[in-house]
Image (spheres, helix red, strand yellow):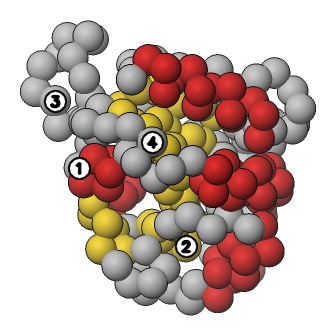
């Protein structure tokens, strides 16, 4: 493949993967399991739609700590935000997400970031810099095969956000970015149901 063709494919991929929903648009709408934003890996054995969906994964955060689906058991509600280093809507919403993470007790609500375009073992300097610049001070995982199978294979654009309850059951997802106040409203609604 020639260099121009590769660059063209890379740019096209970046455009297609970045959902680029404008901030301040409609509030985020949580889709139910069974929709396009459903994590692809299900450990639930029943095929009934009403059965809870659980995922399994293992990854490493930026400090080298191993994190698995057990992290969902630490909070009543976990927000998993999938983002990419090239995605402006992702980066624009991260300061608000950082504020939200700081405003709740971890036992009540937590945020986990997944960097979709940087794999474990690759240089994470840019990732660390972006996290520092945006104030997104919550755990971030780099992509690996386990995370890809559990969460990323069904992602059609970034940012994409998934919600899990305190038992690790998938509650639904949102494709696109949102303002802090819009996320706050959805988080409050989900916490009331738990």
Q: CA distance from mark 3 to mark 4?
A: 25 Å
Q: Residue at x 50, y 56 (%)?
A: 112
Q: Secondary structure at mark 4?
A: loop
Q: CA distance from mark 1 to mark 4?
A: 21 Å
Image coordinates of residue 47 in percent, x first then y, are: 17, 16
* Residue 67 in which image quadrant: bottom left
Image coordinates of residue 114 in percent, x first then y, are: 51, 60
Nearer-N-terminus badge (4/2): 4
Relative to 12, does residue 129 appear above or below in the rendering? Answer: below
Nearer-N-terminus badge (2/3): 3
Report which residue position mark 3 lands on. Answer: 44
Nearer-N-terminus badge (3/4): 3
Q: Secondary structure at mark 3?
A: loop
Nearer-N-terminus badge (1/2): 1
Foreground tag (4 vs 2) = 4
Q: CA distance from mark 1 to mark 2?
A: 20 Å
Q: Residues within 10 Å of mark 2 (few under 14, many from 20)?
A: some
Report which residue position mark 1 lands on. Answer: 56
Q: Residues within 10 Å of mark 3 (few under 14, many from 20)?
A: few
Q: CA distance from mark 4 to mark 2?
A: 29 Å
- The answer to whether residue 154 is seen in the rendering is no
Which disc number belongs to residue 108? 4
Q: Residue at x 17, y 37 (%)?
A: 43
* Residue 116 in which image quadrant: bottom right
Foreground tag (1 vs 4) = 4
């Amino acid at each position: 493949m020639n260099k121009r063709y590769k660059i063209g494919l890379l740019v096209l991929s970046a455009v297609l993967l970045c959902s680029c929903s404008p901030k301040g648009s409609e509030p985020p709408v949580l889709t139910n399991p069974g929709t396009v934003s459903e994590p692809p890996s299900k450990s639930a054995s029943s095929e009934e739609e009403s059965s809870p969906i659980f995922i399994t994964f293992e990854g490493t955060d930026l400090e080298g700590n191993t994190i698995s689906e057990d992290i969902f058991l630490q909070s009543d509600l976990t927000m998993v935000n999938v983002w990419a280093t090239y995605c402006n809507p992702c980066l624009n919403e991260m300061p608000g997400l950082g504020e939200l993470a700081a405003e709740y007790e971890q036992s009540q609500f937590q945020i986990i970031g997944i960097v979709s375009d940087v794999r474990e073992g690759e240089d994470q300097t840019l990732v660390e810099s972006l996290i520092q610049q945006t104030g997104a001070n919550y755990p971030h995982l780099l992509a690996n095969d386990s995370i890809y199978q559990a969460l990323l294979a069904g992602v059609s654009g970034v940012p994409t956000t998934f919600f899990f309850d305190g038992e690790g059951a998938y509650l639904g997802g949102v494709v696109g970015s949102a303002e802090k106040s819009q996320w706050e409203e959805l988080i409050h609604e989900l916490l009331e149901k738990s």
